[in-house]
């Protein structure tokens, strides 16, 4: 059984561009298209719509790329902070091992939370205890 191949957005846009180019450069195709009601005015509207669509597609692609880059930068920075915090947490646990109140105030007891917001609050307590 044959399956329909779905086109990506970029492939579809390219097919439309090629179609408009073929109509403009091939008189036989232009004649057939005119018979179906696709005159020069309608083709110009289509080309304009294609241009706007391509610009929107390119803008969206650029935004997606920037978002991916920012997320990767965030992950790298968070990982560095996590490594530094883990080392400082171990040192603080040793330093304050005989002071349970301080350990509790700095959130050095128990395990580290997995969710980002809760993890960040625990990290803040060690570095900025006056805020936490």
Image (spheres, rainbow, N blue to C red):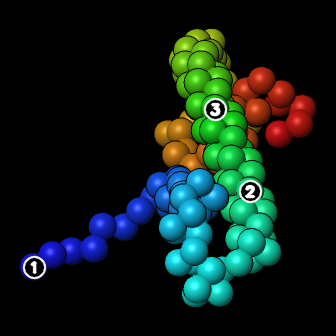
- Kindly tell me whether residue 60 is visible in this rendering: no
Q: Quarter of the image containing the N terminus?
A: bottom left
Q: Residue at x 55, y 19 (%)?
A: 83
The residue wearing badge 2 is 51
Q: Residue at x 76, y 33 (%)?
A: 124
Return the x and y of residue 95 as percentages of the image width and height.
62, 12
Q: Residue at x 68, y 47 (%)?
A: 58
Q: 100 or 36: nearer the eye?
A: 36
In this view, the residue farthest toward the right is 130
In this view, the residue farthest toward the bottom is 36
Q: Quarter of the image containing the C terminus?
A: top right
Residue 69: mark: 3
Task: Tell me which numbered mark, 3 or 1, is placed earlier along the sequence.
Answer: 1
3D distance between C-alphas at marks 3 and 1: 42 Å
In this view, the residue farthest toward the left is 1
3D distance between C-alphas at marks 2 and 1: 37 Å
Q: Nearer the viewer, mark 2 or mark 1?
A: 2
Q: Residue at x 71, y 78 (%)?
A: 39
Return the x and y of residue 131 as percentages of the image width and height.
89, 36
Secondary structure of residue under mark 1: loop
3D distance between C-alphas at marks 3 and 2: 27 Å
The residue wearing badge 1 is 1
Q: Residues within 10 Å of mark 3 (few under 14, many from 20)?
A: few
- Kindly tell me whether residue 35 is visible in this rendering: yes
Image position of 119 with respect to 24: above or below: above
Q: 4 or 118: nearer the eye?
A: 4
Secondary structure of residue under mark 2: helix
């Amino acid at each position: 059984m044959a399956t329909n191949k779905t086109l990506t957005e970029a492939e579809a846009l390219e097919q439309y561009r090629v179609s408009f180019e073929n109509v403009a450069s091939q008189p036989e195709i232009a004649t057939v298209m005119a018979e179906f009601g696709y005159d020069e005015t309608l083709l110009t509207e289509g080309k304009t719509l294609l241009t706007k669509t391509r610009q929107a597609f390119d803008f969206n692609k650029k935004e997606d790329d920037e978002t991916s880059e920012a997320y990767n930068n965030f992950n790298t920075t968070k990982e560095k902070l996590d490594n530094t915090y883990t080392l400082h947490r171990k040192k603080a646990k040793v330093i304050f091992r005989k002071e349970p109140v301080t350990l509790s105030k700095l959130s050095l007891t128990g395990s580290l939370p997995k969710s980002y917001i809760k993890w960040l609050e625990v990290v803040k307590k060690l570095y900025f205890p006056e805020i936490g």
